[in-house]
Image (cartoon, rainbow, N blue to C red):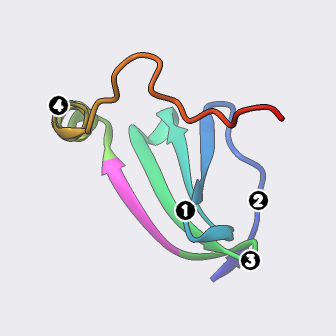
């Protein structure tokens, strides 16, 4: 477990839905042909996964497929169905 380090030039941080003390950090390491996914809690790295660059398209396809399915099965609201309170 290590303390937080600056992200490489290409990377991002995603906060966990359970709270801001948990995060997923994604960083490209082009010099090693790797993408590193790391799990963070309270600014401490609790685990890493090294994904070879050639496997990134497969991960992207999986995420895209899941997102497409989620949108297809999401309930839709008719236009103008937002709830409004009457004034007065």
SS for callout 4? helix
* Residue that mark 3 sits on: 42
SS for callout 2? loop
Q: Disc 3 and disc 4: Cα gap in Å?
A: 36 Å
Select label 1 or label 2 by which is in front.
1
Select label 3 or label 1 by which is in front.
1
Q: Is residue 72 above or below residue 36?
A: above
Q: Earlier in the sequence, mark 1 or mark 2?
A: 2
Residue at 57 percent across and 71 percent down: it is: 18
Q: Earlier in the sequence, mark 3 or mark 2?
A: 2
Q: Disc 3 and disc 2: Cα gap in Å?
A: 13 Å
* Residue that mark 4 sits on: 72
Select label 3 or label 4 by which is in front.
4
* Residue that mark 2 sits on: 5
**Residue 49 drawn in magenta:** yes
Horizontal and vertical percent for residue 80? 47, 18
Q: Disc 4 and disc 2: Cα gap in Å?
A: 39 Å
Q: Are marks 1 and 2 in contact (CB under 8 Å)?
A: no
Select label 4 or label 2 by which is in front.
4
At label 4, counting other C-alpha atoms closer than 10 Å, the crowd grade (few under 14, some 14-19, many 20 or more) is few
Q: Earlier in the sequence, mark 3 or mark 4?
A: 3
* Residue that mark 1 sits on: 17
Residue segment shown in magenta:
47-51
SS for callout 3? loop
At label 1, counting other C-alpha atoms closer than 10 Å, the crowd grade (few under 14, some 14-19, many 20 or more) is few
**Residue 65 drawn in magenta:** no
Could you tell me which quadrant the N terminus lies in? Answer: bottom right
Q: Disc 3 and disc 1: Cα gap in Å?
A: 14 Å
Q: Residue furthest front?
A: 88
SS for callout 1? loop
Q: Nearer the viewer, residue 50 or 82?
A: 82
Q: Residue furthest right?
A: 88
């Amino acid at each position: 477990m290590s303390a937080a380090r600056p992200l490489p030039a290409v990377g991002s941080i995603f906060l966990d839905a359970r709270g801001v003390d948990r995060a997923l950090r994604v960083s490209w390491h082009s010099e090693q042909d790797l993408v590193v996914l790391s799990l963070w809690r309270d600014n401490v790295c609790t685990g890493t996964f090294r994904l070879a660059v050639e496997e990134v398209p497969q991960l992207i396809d999986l995420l895209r497929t899941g997102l497409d399915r989620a949108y297809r099965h999401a309930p839709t609201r008719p236009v103008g169905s937002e709830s409004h309170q009457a004034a007065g």
